[in-house]
Image (cartoon, rainbow, N blue to C red):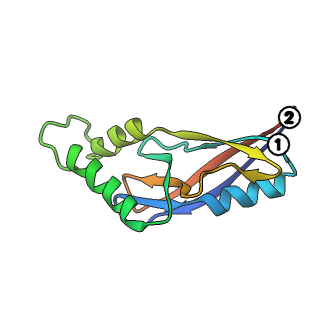
Amino acid sequence: MKFVTDSFPVSTNAHNQMLDISDKVRNAVEKSGISNGSVLVFCPHTTAAITINENADPDVTHDVLLTLSSLIPHNNAGYQHSEGNSDAHTKSSLVGCSETVIIKDNRLQLGTWQGIYFCEFDGPRKRTVNLQITGL
């Protein structure tokens, strides 16, 4: 087995935001030289997340963020965490910190409408996405 690690920066400009990072992951996979295997996309931040969802209609990301904000409001009088970002920690835990994508013939095996998203819940910030590309 072959392992390649990589990372790239992500800058966000809103408190809640979903950024399509598919091309950055795709470029790292192509650069790795691994033709078949998988890529683990990992977010090392407790107030952000990684998910896979539709990337054809921007209304989808709007609706996901709207739903999360409705379910988990930013200013909840009952939060006890003193930094004021409890909503971001909760959203991060619900969405998750990583996704794994199959690589076949040096291509991400995403569905027709799927994209990989970095989800910001405590921005704007400068963040990092870590990758582990594993070849068979």
Q: Nearer the viewer, residue 41 or 62?
A: 62
Element marked by disc 1: loop
Q: Which mark is residue 36?
A: 1
Among the 4 quarters of the image, the one containing residue 89: top left
The extreme top residue here reads: 1
Image spot of residue 27 (x, y percent): 74, 61
Q: Tag 2: Cα neighbours inside 10 Å, few (<14), some, or many (≥20)?
A: few
Q: Residue at x 39, y 59 (%)?
A: 61
Q: Residue at x 19, y 37 (%)?
A: 79
The quadrant in which the N terminus is found is top right
The extreme left residue here reads: 77
The quadrant in which the C terminus is found is top right
**37 relative position to 41: left or right:** right
Q: Residue at x 33, y 38 (%)?
A: 90
Image spot of residue 21 (x, y percent): 58, 59
The extreme front residue here reads: 112
Image spot of residue 12 (x, y percent): 46, 64
Amino acid type at mark 1: Asn
Q: How many marks?
A: 2
Q: Nearer the viewer, residue 26 or 75?
A: 26
Residue linked to disc 2: 136
**57 relative position to 29: left or right:** left
**4 relative position to 111: left or right:** right
Element marked by disc 2: loop
Rendered view: 133 above or below 64: above
Q: Tag 1: Cα neighbours inside 10 Å, few (<14), some, or many (≥20)?
A: some
Amino acid type at mark 2: Leu
